[in-house]
Amino acid sequence: MNSLRANQALVADEILLDGRLALYHQTERWLAVADLHFGYELSQRAAGRLVPMWGMASISERLMRLVEEYAPRCLIVLGDLVHDKTAAREAAQLLREIARRCEVVVVAGNHDRQLGRHVELVESWQTDRFHFHHGHCAADAAGRIQILGHHHPAAVITDGAGLRLKCPAFVQQSSCWIMPAFSPWASGTRWEPDQSSRIWLCTEERVFALPDKEAAA
């Protein structure tokens, strides 16, 4: 890619952050997403809560667009592919469709316990430089940068007049990068800034790094 769109940022050498909540390596051609919680609305309806039936369609459409645009060699799902077993078959079907275009690696998350008979899971995945895992358990990264999910980071910005906007965030530390949740249902946990973290605010239209004074507002 010769030029970046407003919803892309180069967060490290050859690593693109896409505001649609994905990370892409331009040379190794892996595309990473985390915490889809696919089928959340089915789970909630099974529990008697009448939530809109739009999350699964949103996830499927956005993920397929990313795969079509970036044409990765490998899609890495960093855990919590599903919210629970309610949508296991639908999630497996989505992955089968994607697998026609690229390799798919699904890292096991804490919500994926009953997914094994529908989808092949791995505990972690790695390249020479990166170690991918869900993040709910400690991992031995052997000197690699960890890329994980689980925490659903979010950032809050204000206009000084009372308006507050909360958006998914990508958190970048020297040895650990934390992915935003891909699920549209995940409001996110506000990430408190410190000197060791760079926080990137993500929207479908724009990605930008927050200066300390805004991240702390």
Image (spheres, rainbow, N blue to C red):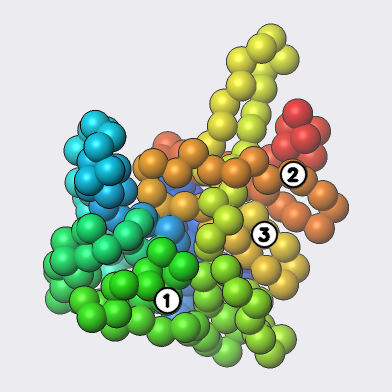
Residue 42 lies, in percent from the top left, at 22, 47
Q: Amino acid at mark 1?
A: Val
Residue name at image x 23 percent, y 58 percent? 86
Q: Residue at x 21, y 76 (%)?
A: 118
Task: Tell which circle, 3 or 2, labels the residue nearer the N-terminal end.
Answer: 3
Contact flag, marks 1 and 3 (Cβ < 8 Å): no
Residue 173 occupies which quadrant of the picture?
Answer: bottom right
The one of 15 and 5 positioned closer to us in this rendering:
15
Question: Which numbered marker is on residue 192?
Answer: 2
Disc 3 marks a residue whose amino acid type is Gln
Nearer to us: label 3 or label 2: 2
The image shows residue 205 at horizontal and vertical percentages of: 42, 37
Q: Is 50 in front, or is 119?
A: 50
Binning the other alpha carbons within 10 Å of mark 2 as few (below 14), some (14 to 19) or many (20 upward) gives: some
Q: Badge 3 is on which residue?
A: 172
Q: Is residue 82 above or below residue 145?
A: above
* Label number found at residue 107: 1
